[in-house]
Image: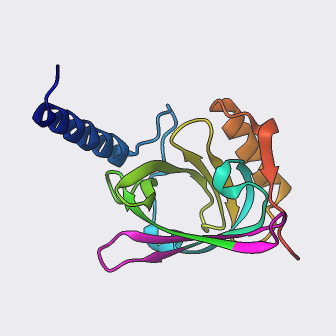
């Protein structure tokens, strides 16, 4: 039978292992993040064009992301969207850190303390107007734009790349952005 001290040690070890596992946050795929990547050019406002839907963004339209520099070199992430079912705005603020070299678009993002998830910018145009982002598994994908729309040519290129990388693009939610 396990005594209280052994239980406490076992629980502490499990908690530390969970934090270490989640803080790694690398994207588990064969797809490389953009390199070279320019953090300063990536900062600013982005409109979500499409996403693979998940709990936080369910029933959301007008989704945007704003990236700004924190004093410690990390990136402040502010996601905002309108829940059209509840008729209310929702905002979530988190932090992103580079997951390795700062000239590669491999990041880890946290909205919940020490728990991070992978966030890889896998495609971006030379002017940093359009981006394709993969999450840490095939359940997370975003197409972003500096404008509320994206050119058909870029959309088709990003969809083809996502499909070739194993994503089910038929499941994408095309975000409604108010004109």
Please provide the residue range marked out in magenta: 67-89
Q: Position of residue 29 (x, y in %)?
A: 50, 33
Can residue 36 be seen at all in this image of the molecule?
Answer: no
Instruction: Determine the residue located farthest toward the right in the rendered image.
Output: 179
Looking at this view, is 161 or 58 the one in front?
58
Is 67 on the left or on the right of 102, as rendered? right
The question of residue 105 being in magenta is answered with no
The question of residue 83 being in magenta is answered with yes
Image quarter (top left, top right, bottom left or bottom right) of the N terminus:
top left
Is 59 on the left or on the right of 40, as rendered? right
Looking at this view, is 138 or 148 the one in front?
138
At x 68% / y 61%, what residue is drawn?
144
Image quarter (top left, top right, bottom left or bottom right) of the C terminus:
bottom right
Instruction: Determine the residue located farthest toward the top in the rendered image.
Output: 1
Whether residue 133 is situated above or below residue 76 in the rendered picture: above
Q: Position of residue 176 (x, y in %)?
A: 84, 64
Q: Main secondary structure of the magenta part?
A: strand
Quarter of the rendering containing residue 45: bottom right
């Amino acid at each position: 039978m396990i005594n209280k001290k052994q239980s406490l040690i076992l629980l502490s070890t499990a908690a530390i292992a969970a934090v270490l596992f989640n803080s790694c946050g690398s994207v588990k795929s064969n797809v490389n993040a953009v390199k070279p990547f320019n953090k300063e050019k990536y900062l600013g406002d982005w409109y979500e064009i499409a996403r693979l839907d998940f709990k936080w963004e369910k029933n959301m339209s007008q989704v945007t992301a704003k990236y700004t520099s924190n004093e410690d070199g990390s990136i402040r992430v502010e996601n905002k969207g309108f829940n059209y079912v509840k008729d209310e705005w929702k905002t979530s603020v988190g932090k992103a850190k580079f997951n390795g070299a700062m000239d590669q678009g491999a990041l880890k993002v946290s909205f919940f303390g020490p728990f991070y998830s992978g966030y890889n910018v896998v495609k971006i145009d030379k002017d940093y107007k359009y981006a394709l982002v993969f999450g840490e598994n095939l359940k997370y994908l975003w197409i972003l734009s500096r404008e509320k729309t994206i050119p058909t040519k870029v959309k088709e290129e990003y969809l083809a790349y996502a499909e070739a990388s194993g994503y089910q693009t038929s499941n994408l939610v095309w975000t409604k952005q108010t004109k």
